[in-house]
Image: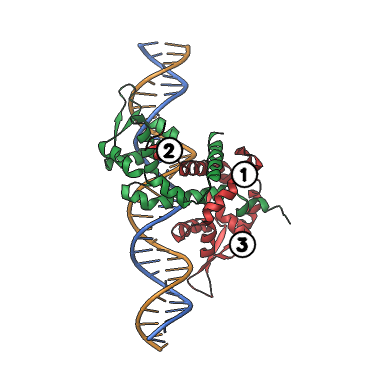
Chain colours: A red, B green, C blue, D orange
DNA sequence: TAATATTTAATCGCACACGATATACTAGAA
DNA sequence: TTCTAGTATATCGTGTGCGATTAAATATTA
């Protein structure tokens, strides 16, 4: 039996489990990230930097889908923790460049074990992981 | 070619597209929800109430995967907007019961068109939607 | 029944997300 | 070259999320 309000039932939404799963996974990272003195958003920021040092904020924001209103305070915190340096580009004084400190580079080795622990806790088959990954990037890229 | 740092590349994470897609979808709701004077979290809260009026905060929190530290201020805002009433249970004075106001009930009819607009904007096939939905609930329930 | 344990919600502090706006710098056009 | 448009970052205010703690009410146990 269906009625005109079916469309606004919580259990018929796709947005809701996306939101709830995202929150849940971020929560599940906390015990691991506490050891590294990182929040989740700081962690994914460090991931970008581990892959590409001396990136500017704009490029960083494009990779993370975040803008300066989120990144500026976040980068300041990473700087206070001694993981990154922030300086202005000499080519273009509007841009800021983010570089890893020695401490920030060292952190990389401590992070290696985290993804495995998290992904195991999700209890998904390889197929499910692949499909989920592809569908999510399809949504992101559209 | 693989190396020991592959596991901590952003593009090899499942958590990241989950986080980014969740944020993206919540952003995409904003123009629709502005018309209803609701934030995204307030919207999913209203969805629960449209399905089950006079629910207590605990049950509400279980459905939304949220606790009082998030719900208490959120419910106060919905009360200020005139969409809900909050009162103590007479059976158990620890519990608070949330009920819809007339205005809150009326809002339901304005919300009906939103899910279709959002889901179309994701450009997914039926199969992809089904698989995504099932996988997300598998993660939530494990 | 009195002491203790459990449950429910509220409060606190911190760190995002994000729309809107401001500011500083650069590039392009007249 | 000067005026204007565009770009990159910072700032502000609001509303979450969430771990930790507190407070109040109820349930359990000695």
Q: Are marks 1 and 2 on the same chain?
A: yes
The residue labelled by disc 2 is: A10
Q: Would residue A37 be found to the left or right of residue B114 on screen? A: right
First of labels 1, 2 by sequence position = 2
**Mark 1 = which residue?**
A129
C29 above or below D28? below
Q: Which residue is mark 3?
A: A52
Is residue A39 visible in the rendered image? The answer is: no
Above or below, C13 against D3 in this view is above
Direction from residue B86 to residue B120 in the image, left or right: right
Whole-angstrom CA distance, mark 3 to mark 2, is: 40 Å
Crowding at mark 1 (Cα within 10 Å: few <14, some 14-19, many 20+): some
Whole-percent x, y for residue B128 in the image: 55, 45
Query: Where is residue B83, by image quadrant?
Result: top left
- Horizontal side, residue A115 vs residue B121: left or right: right
Circle 1 chain: A
Q: Position of residue B74 (x, y in %)?
A: 35, 41
Q: Earlier in the sequence, mark 1 or mark 3?
A: 3
Q: Chain of mark 3?
A: A
Instruction: Say whether residue B96 is visible.
Output: yes
Q: Compared to C1, does A110 lie above or below? A: below
């Amino acid at each position: 039996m269906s009625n005109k309000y079916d469309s606004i039932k919580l259990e018929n939404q796709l947005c809701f489990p996306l939101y709830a799963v995202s929150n849940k996974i971020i929560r599940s990272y906390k015990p691991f990230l506490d050891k590294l003195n990182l929040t989740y958003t700081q962690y994914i920021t460090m991931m970008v930097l581990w892959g590409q040092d001396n990136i500017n904020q704009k490029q960083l924001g494009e990779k993370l889908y975040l803008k300066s209103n989120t990144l500026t305070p976040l980068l300041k915190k990473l700087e206070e923790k001694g993981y990154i340096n922030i300086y202005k580009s000499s080519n273009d004084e509007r841009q800021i460049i983010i570089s890893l400190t020695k401490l920030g580079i060292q952190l990389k080795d401590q992070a290696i074990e985290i993804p495995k622990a998290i992904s195991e806790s999700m209890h998904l088959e390889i197929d499910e992981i692949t499909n989920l990954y592809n569908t999510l990037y399809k949504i992101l890229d559209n």
